[in-house]
Amino acid sequence: MKFAPPLVEARLIQRYKRFLADMEIGGESVTVHCPNPGSMMGLAAPGSRCWLMPKSGTKLPYCWELVESHACGVTGASGITALVGINTGRANAIVAEGLAAGVFPNLPAATVTREVTVGPGSIHGSRLDFRLGDAEGRPCWVEVKSVTLSRSAGLAEFPDAKTERGSRHLAELAALAEAGQRAVLLFLVQRSDCREVRLAADIDPTYAAAMTQARAQGVEIRAFSCGISAHGIDAGAEMAFIHG
């Protein structure tokens, strides 16, 4: 996924009210859109180097896309940084491009339908991110979660805040798996410094319990890295998921 138009470099002054941030661009303060509903733990330190997408026809002139974060858990980490994609709305587009390019092993992509409401038998009437089909038309449901939290070197964590919606999605995937359909939760790690993913059970024990139940009912958990630069973000190699 290439950024167009090109991103503009800025410095973070403050993030507030979840969806707003003040940035310094060329010595001037500008209020921009922050497209991330989570806590953004460790990613909103004043003075952080950021990259913004220019917007036209909107009240706010920029959308925050990337932030440079010091690597976690590294002694004397001055100068050791990671690029993080903070726009959670980009995750599905990145996955869609990856499916078209055959990046995700063992995920069918003969047909790809986005944002599909689960039909009869749905628990919550949820809409899941993808319904994939193989050459025989057998469905594979995929829910994508963007991962940006890291509190230990090389280790990404999800979630960064309590997520009732995430627990509902796990229950929906579990019901589909029990009904004999393939169901996958895909963690997309939008950080350049992580090799593994685990649950942040201390942040949301309910979600961790829902994950345990979903896996027992047959839900597959997959995790993938991203290649990130100021030019774009692309899905990368598969990563290990650590549960428990």
Image: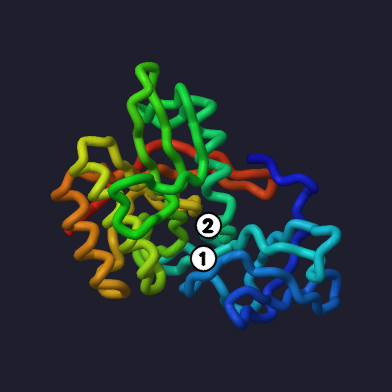
Looking at the picture, tell me which residue is in the foreground, 116 or 4: 116
Give the residue displayed 37% in from the left and 55% down from the top.
154
User: Disc 2 designates what residue?
Assistant: 82
The amino acid on which the numbered mark 1 sits, given as a three-letter code, is His
Q: Which mark is residue 62?
A: none
Looking at the picture, tell me which residue is in the foreground, 128 or 108: 128
Element type where label 1 sits in the image: strand
Q: Is residue 95 left or right of residue 217?
A: right
Quadrant of the drawing holding the C terminus: bottom left
Give the residue displayed 57% in from the left and 74% down from the top.
44
x then y, percent, for residue 199: 28, 61
Quadrant of the drawing holding the N terminus: top right
x then y, percent, for residue 192: 49, 50
Compared to 55, does 240 lie above or below?
Answer: above
User: Disc 1 designates what residue?
Assistant: 70
Q: Which badge, 1 or 2, is on the more N-terminal residue?
A: 1
x then y, percent, for residue 76: 45, 69
